[in-house]
Image (cartoon, helix red, strand yellow):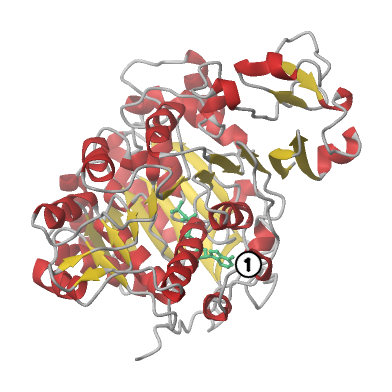
Amino acid sequence: MSCPWFTDSRSRTTLQTLPNRSSFVPRISKETDGLLGVIPHGEEREYQESHKTNNVAAAYEDVPVQATGFDIPSHVTSFEEMGFSTNALTDNIRRCKYVKPTPIQSYAIPVAMAGRDLMACAQTGSGKTAAFCFPIINGVMDMQRRKRIVNHSAASGIACPVALILAPTRELSCQIHEVAKKFSYQTGVKVVVAYGGASTVLQLRNLEKGVDILVATPGRLVDFIERGKISLRNVKYLALDEADRMLDMGFERQVRKIVQQMEMPQPGARQTMLFSATFPAEIQKLASDFLSNYIFLAAGKVGSSTDLIVQRVEFVCDVDKRYRLMNLLRSGMTDNSPSKDSLTLVFVETKRAADALERWLSRKGFPSTAIHGDKIQMERERALRLFRSGCTPILVATDVAARGLDIPHVAHVINFDLPRAVDDYVHRIGRTGRAGKSGLATAFFSEKNAPLAKPLVELMQETNQEIPEWLNKYAKAAYTGGGSGRSSGHGCSKFGGYDYRSGVDCKNSDDYWTQHVDKALSPYVVTSSSSISAYNDRYTSTSDPFAYSLPYAPDISAPTASSFDLGPYNHVYDGSTVATGWE
Ligand SMILES: Nc1ncnc2c1ncn2[C@@H]1O[C@H](COP(=O)(O)OP(=O)(O)OP(=O)(O)O)[C@@H](O)[C@H]1O
C-alpha cells in the first residue's frame, strides 16, 4: 500500500504579524520554498515566518470558546490528552504535522470522545474537519477491536457503514474523503466516498470492498440506498459538515429523509455531530431534531469571519467591475505575471457570468479557469486541479466553491458580485486566511447590494476592519428590502454564534442550564433558561430576574472575578460541569 501523504514542495508557514490593514495587497515571497504572504503595499519588506514548523494553533490562541449544555466534558490542550485508543491515529496526526489542537479541536474532540452529541460552530479554516474525523476514526477502531463491526453483508451485498459524513458539494465530499483517508492510514479503517456526477460503477465497486466511514453528498446517497446498495441500519456516527447549509431550504428534505426515514438508528442510539462556521438560530432549531442531549460549542465570534482576513469593500458600478478587477489582479502580480503561489478566487453570482468572466480574463492574458454547477464533474475537478496546482492561478466561481474547500495559497478572495446573505460572504472569504495564515478579501459593492450593507458593516465591526464612510451611510439607511440577511432564505437572524436554547423558547427548559457572555453587563453574567426558579436559592439575583452576576455566585468555580475575566472557566452545578470555556 502506498503512503497517501503528499509532499508539497511549498512549505506551509504562518505569518506572525498582520501589517496595517489599510495597505494590504497580497504578494508572494520570492523565496523558493514559497511562503504565502501578505506584504504591505509599496514596502517590499519580507515578513518573518513565526515558525518554520506548523504553528497553526498559536494563531487561534486567543480565540474564546464557549460550551453550553449538560455535564460538559473538560477540554484538553494536546492531542496526547485526547485518549485515542491506539497509536496509529496519533502517528497520523503527527505525520500531518498537527502539533497542537486548534480551539475547536480542543473542545469538540473530548465531547465527541465522551459519546456526546454536538453542535459546533467555529471560524472558517480553523480545523473542524479533524474535529469530527478523529473521534469517528477512533470509535471505528474501537469497534473493530471489539469485533463489533459488520460493515458489509456478504449475503445481501449491501454496504453497511458505521459512520456517515454528509457534505453539501461533490468537491467538499472528495476533500473530506481524502483527509479522512490520510487520518485513517494504517488503522484498518475503510473510508469510501459517494457523490453525484461521477461513475456509479466505480463507487459501487469501492463500496463492495467494504466501508466503515462513508462520505457522501445527499443525492447520490439516497440513490444508492433506494437501489439497495447501502443500508444505514448500522450507523453509529453521523456528522454533517456545513450543517446549516445541509438544513437550509435546498437540502433539508433530503437530509431529513436520510436521517429519519432510511433505517438510521434514532438520536441517542447513534452519535450526531453538526459542524459549521455559521449557525443561524432557526437552523439550530431544525437541527435539534437530530440530536440528543447535545453540547453546543462556539469557538470565536461565530457567524463572524476570522480576523486573519483583512476585508476591503470598494464601491464599483457594475460597468466598471471588469476593469477594476484587472487592476487588482495586476497589483498582485510579481514581474507582470500572476504567481503560482498566490492564488486568487473570484466569486460571481451566476454560472453564465462565471463563464463570461473567465473567457474575458483569459483574453486579457490572465490565466483563469471557472467552476460552477453547469459544468460536468470532470470539468469541475479539472478546474480545481489547475487552480490548486497554480497552473491557472485565478479561479472564477459561483457559490459551489464557497464552502469548505481548503486550498492552500489562496491569498485573495474577490467578491466581484456580492452574495445576498452575509453568511455566504463569511464562507466565501473563508477560502483565504486558513490554518492560521493571513489573507485578503476584496468586495465590489454596487447600488444593488444596499440590503447587505448593514449585516456587512456589523460583521466587519466584529473583526475590527476598516469600514468606508460611504458603507456606513448605506448601513445607517438600514435598507432591508429585497431579503438580505444572515443566511439564504432565512432572514436576518442575529449572529448564530450562541446556543439558541438559551432563549426563553428553550425546548428542554426543565432540565437545561446554559450561560453566555454579555460584555455589557459587568463583569460577567450567567444567564439561565426559563427554569431559573430551580436555581434561585443558589444564586443572588440582579435586577434582571434571569441574570446572575458572577462574583455573587458562590458555587461557580471561578476563583475571582478578575481572573475569570481573562482565563479559563468551568461552571459546576450540583457536581456537574454545566459550562466551560475560555474568555
Ligand atoms: N491542529 C492543527 N494543526 C495544524 N494544521 C491544522 C490543524 N487542524 C487543521 N489544520 C489545517 O487547517 C486547514 C483548515 O482545516 P479545515 O479544512 O478542517 O477547516 P474548517 O474549519 O473545516 O474550514 P471551513 O469552515 O472553511 O470548512 C487544513 O489545511 C488543515 O489541514
Q: Is residue 426 visible?
A: yes
- Give left or right: position of 8 versus 76: left
Residue type indicated by callout 1: Gly
Q: Residues within 10 Å of mark 1 (few under 14, many from 20)?
A: some
Residue 320 falls in image quadrant: top left
* Residue 358 point in image, percent of width and height: 22, 57
Identify the residue at image location x=62%, y=73%: 54
The quadrant in which residue 45 appears is bottom right
Q: Quadrant of the N terminus?
A: bottom left
Q: Is residue 34 above or below residue 69?
A: below
Which quarter of the figure is the C terminus placed in? top right
Above or below, 369 relative to 208? above
Residue at the farthest bottom position: 1
Q: Is residue 431 left or right of residue 463?
A: left
Tell me the residue that label 1 is attached to.
83
Coordinates of residue 424 in the picture (x, y in percent) = 38, 39
Instruction: Say which element carries label 1.
Output: loop
Mark 1 residue's CB less than 8 Å from ligand 1: no
Of 425 and 445, nearer the camera is 425
Question: Which residue is rendered at x = 91% and y = 36% of the image?
Answer: 560
Side (left or right) of 506 relative to 197: right
Q: Is residue 467 above or below residue 353?
A: above
